[in-house]
Amino acid sequence: MAEDFWHGHPDRMNETAHDALKAQCEQQWERCLYTSNTLLIWLRTLRKLRIGFIITPIVFGTLASWDLISSDDRFRVLTAVLALVAGLVPAIYAALKLDEHMPTAARLAGEYKNLEILFKDLGRIGPKKTFAEFEAEYKEARERLEAANKESYTAPEWCFNRARAKIEKGDYWFEEENQSRNNRIDE
């Protein structure tokens, strides 16, 4: 039945297939936009936490051993608390295993960002190519996306909410994209 409809209308069939594939590119681009920015926010957080967990015991240990504080009996409790925190922080950091997340978050944030760019370009340029070329490039991009998705690595939900807020605010848009977006919203 579909063949009867398209019979004699190959341009219409080709146009519809291009449009469908372009729509898929736009959906995959948006998914990659949110995922890459969520992972980038998580990665920044992991790096800041790492710095905090490294600096805190150094500062607290230095303060605990400072003669001005440690030699005065009035600061005995403070000195003990500072020493305790200086000793606990590295153990807490090791138990959380945050360092193990950084390579995965960095690699996947980069891959999703690259896929975001790829799907955006493919959605713009692909419809100008033959359907076979467009479809082949789309399939390659989808295979990369599926490989990244197989890891099922997730950042905390607050990272997604923050990324969504930044995206909706326009933080990740170029000026020409902001104008295009605003024109679509106004229509």
Image (spheres, helix red, strand yellow):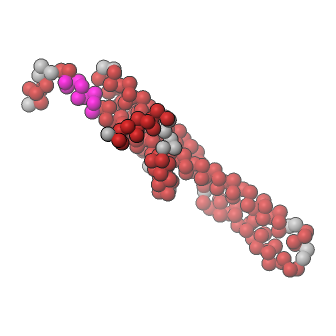
The residue that appears at 18% across and 20% down in the rendered structure is: 10
Residue at far bottom of view: 74
The residue that appears at 70% across and 61% down in the rendered structure is: 90
Between residue 54 and residue 19, name the one nearer to us.
19
Magenta includes 140? no
Q: Which quadrant holds residue 95?
A: bottom right
Find residue 130 and report its horizontal and vertical position in percent: 30, 20
Q: Which quadrant holds residue 120?
A: top left
Q: Which quadrant holds residue 13?
A: top left
Find residue 78 and report its horizontal and vertical position in percent: 79, 75
* Vertical side of 58 occupied by 181: above or below: above
The residue that appears at 60% across and 49% down in the rendered structure is: 44
Decide if residue 129 is on the left or right side of residue 115.
left
Q: Which residues are magenta?
A: 12-20
Find residue 81 and report its horizontal and vertical position in percent: 76, 73
Res. 140 in view: no
Image quarter where the C terminus lies is top left
